[in-house]
Structures are given as C-alpha cells and as structure tokens.
Amino acid sequence: MHLDTQKIIKALFIACLIVVLTTIKSKLEPHFEHLDLFLYFFLFLTSLFIMSIIEVVFEKLDESDWFKKIINKRDYIQGAWLNYAMDADTREIYNFALLKIDRVKDQIRLDGSTFRALITTDGNIITSPDGHFFSSIAQYQSENGQLGFDFTVDFSERVRECKHQIIGNATYFFERSDKVPRTFTGEFSTEHPATFCNIIGHRVDEKLIAHSGSLLERYRRAIEIAIQRNWIESNQLPKAQLTT
C-alpha cells in the first residue's frame, strides 16, 4: 500500500473514531455526572487501545500479498516474471531470465537468475544456469508503468571472464491487461563489458514455478508455460548441439 493511501485511510479511521467516542461520551455523561475524570480517562484508554489495533492491522495488511493486489491492482508489478530477448532477423529467443520483483515498504527490489534453454531434435527442452543479478535501487513511475533500476551481476560466465562484478541499468515498460500489469518490454545495458539488449517479459504464476522441483526444472517449466501460452514458439529456441 502506498504511503499516501495509508495516510488517507488512517485519517478516515481516526475521524470515525472521534465521532464514535464523542457519541459514546454524550451517552455516558448522564450516568457519570460526578465522574468526569474517570470518564475522560476511560475514553482515553479506549482510544489508545483502538489506535494500537489499527496500527497492527495496517502493518499486517501491508505485509499481505492479496491486499496489495486489491489496493494497488493497477501498479502491482510484484511477483515472478519470465523475460527473454529475440533476434530481430532470425527470431531466435535467447537471454532467458526468471525475475522476482518485491516491494518492501515503498522500496522495489529485484532478484533474477539467468539461464540457457535449448531444444533437442525430439522436442525436449534442456536448461542450464547462466548467472544471477540483483537490484535494490529502483524507481517505478505509475503514470506510464515505467520501472527503471540499476543492477549488479554477481556471477555468470562473463563475470568469470572479466573477473569482476558487472554493473548495469535497465528500463521496463509494463502493459496492463484487465488493469493489472501482465507483460513488459524493455532494455538493459552494461558498461564493462559493453552490452545492450531489448527484452520482453511476461508474468508467470509463482506457484507453478515454485512447485516444479529443482532449479533446472523451474527453468524448464517456465519455458513450457511460455510455449503453452503462445508467448514463444518451440522452434524459436536455440537448437541443442549433438555430441558424439
């Protein structure tokens, strides 16, 4: 829940609380004509207790994933995403990544694992880990659904080659379906070594991925979902090289 939304709802709760306590006070005054101090003390404790409950409720709701989906439906980008790049000429798909987006308070954090996906002549999908990147510096613009962030690749084949972590930045533009972000297009780039790539992303069901077993099985399952939902075609995957 955004901070401004929290403030508005809390203010409404407090206003309602004031009205209720004022009504209670007017009802109780005839019965406690000589106990004004006790009445005020009782109302003070009651209001303090109710405010404490409101704070606890808001903290729990702020941690609730389903509540965030309802309140921030239009800007709910949290969850699991599959992204990839496509060669403009051959339409071959590459640069696969499973990305997890979280929001902690008002901070957006990303964690992604890159992988390779190949297809054999008999149609089997083979996956293998490729690297990992993360970002704790991100900014989301609700008006145009734009997410910009800096990221660090802490291990991959390129990191091993250049012998240092790779720093880069990315921009995603989310597109909404039924008022919920479900796809994005974007780009990322790194400086050392220099890399630039256009990517496409789709939201995937975390439960389907999480229950797929090992990490390689999760990758394979993500590709199968992409094929089933016609995001990509199996013949766009790079062909596995036969070894003898």
Image (cartoon, rainbow, N blue to C red):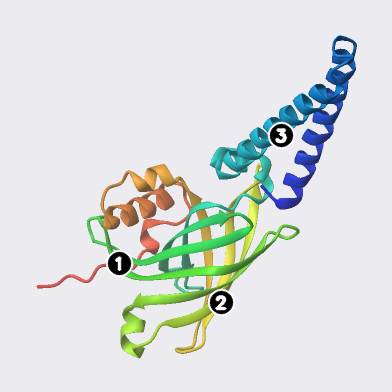
First in sequence: mark 1 or mark 3? 3
Q: Which callout, 1 or 3, points to the residue nearer the camera?
A: 3
Placement of the C terminus among the 4 image quadrants: bottom left
Residue 156 higher or lower than 211, as above or below: below
Q: Which residue is mark 2?
A: 169
Structural crowding at the residue carrying mark 3, measured as other residues with C-alpha within 10 Å and reported as few (<14), some (14–19) or many (≥20): few
Can you say whether 17 is above or below 214 in the image?
Answer: above
Q: Is residue 195 left or right of residue 243?
A: right
Residue 152: image location, x then y, percent: 46, 76
Left or right, 225 with respect to 77, comes to left
Q: Nearer the viewer, residue 124 or 216?
A: 216
Q: Is residue 195 above or below residue 180?
A: below
Q: Amino acid at mark 1?
A: Pro
Q: Going 40% across and 63% down the picture, which residue do you hit?
A: 236
What residue is at 49 percent from the left and 88 percent from the top?
194
According to the picture, the residue beneath numbered tag 1 turns out to be 129
Q: Position of residue 100 (x, y in %)?
A: 47, 57
